[in-house]
Image (cartoon, rainbow, N blue to C red):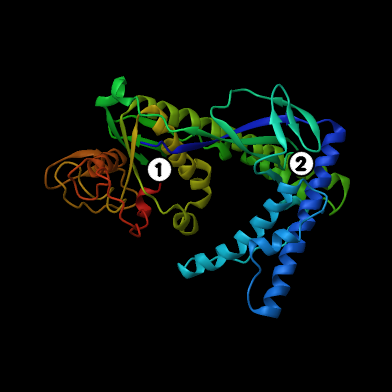
Amino acid sequence: MARSGVIRAYKYRIYPTKKQENQMQEHLWTAKNLWNALLAHSNDYYQKTGKFPGQYDLQKLVKGKGLYAQTQQAIAHKVSNSIFRVFKLKKKGVKCGFPRFKSIDRMKSLVYPQLGFKLEKKLYITPFGEINIKKHREIEGKIKTLILKRESSGKWFAILCSEKEKQQEQGSSRMNKEQQIGIDLGLKYFATLSNGEVIKNPRHLKGHEEQLSQLQRRLSKSKKGSHNRKKAKLKVARLHEKISNTRMDFLHKTSLRLVNTYSLIALEKLASSEMLQKNFGKQINDAGWNMFANMVSYKAESAGCNIVFVNPKNTTKLCSGCGAIVEKELSERIHRCPSCGLVTDRDLNAARNILIRATEGHSGSQASGDNRKEVLSLKEEAHNI
């Protein structure tokens, strides 16, 4: 039986020389101009013919533009895919805007899809030569793609994507096979587990909010195009990067501990994009629910852990003891069931309901391979605090 490959991305900090960095900045500028030229050509072509050019047509226009050949082709493919993606999404009823022209601040990466790079002690990239790289971990599998990325803080990173053969699960020999857990994500606490464990919400943004507001005020007061504005913009970007790094560190450590501890993890399939627009958008982004769910999902495979996403409807109102619906006000943090007399924390009650739904044979379960495509309701507002 053939095994399907697993794609993994590895992000490393690189340290180009001043000359190399200037070259890379020039290539980003060229990539930005190429993107804008291809997008303008696509718009003109549509005005004349009533249709957009395909990938092959755009690919013929990028030859000899000053970038590595495959990097140029990757830009042509990205422009074409971005345009046709709009129509695919609109057919599905999703609101989305047409691809925009880019400024240099919005062009942050150069893609090497197959060739033009080699990783040994240093990272060799055509045409920049050897670049110092901090390879803090070894790459598993065959390297397929390189993305050179410049962050807003001015730091450069190499993102290497590798393909590894899918290994047969070794979970049967793990000690965690008898343990299952339901997890209720929230904002008062980051997560409440069905066994009673509570994971505190670090509130990464709140700890730096005052410093961030000061830096942003200085940025807004500085004159556009001035040297002081560039310095102020860089300071804001570096603080945002620091906040993002602390959030990612917390999410990585939490998700790794959970997948190594439990054999089955049940989560709600939350409509986070709708929730961001409706209420608590800033707090939800700071907590990183979507990032956490993604991390748990991809780490679970190698840890021998199963992940199940369940319908979030009424997980807070439903009594985990008897199944009765108990209406609650937003301020009520205790679940009190008049039918069976159960009194418990509302988030703990929700976590137990999530685990029940993920267990085989219960309503709403997807544990038996139920891949139904259904529009899941928005998680109730009372549960978001």
Residue linked to disc 1: 186
Q: Is residue 143 visible?
A: yes
Whether 177 is drawn above or below 30: the answer is above
Pick the residue in front: 63 or 16: 63
Q: Which mark is residue 234?
A: 2
State the residue at coordinates (73%, 35%).
155
Per the image, label 2 sits on a secondary structure element best described as helix
Q: Residue at x 56, y 65 (%)?
A: 86
In the rendered image, the vertical position of residue 84 relative to residue 114, given as above or below: below
What residue occupies the far front of the structure in this picture?
Answer: 1
Mark nearest the camera among 2 and 1 is 2
Q: Quick one: label 2, few (<14), some, or many (20+) residues within 10 Å?
A: some
Q: Quadrant of the N terminus?
A: top left
User: In the picture shown, does residue 118 fall above or below 107?
Assistant: above
The mark that comes first in sequence, 2 or 1, is 1
Mark 1: amino acid = Gly
**Amino acid type indicated by mark 2:** Leu
Of 116 and 271, which appears nearest the observer?
116
* Relative horizontal placement of residue 366, taking residue 233 as reference (left or right): left
Residue 40 position, x and y percent, is 74, 68
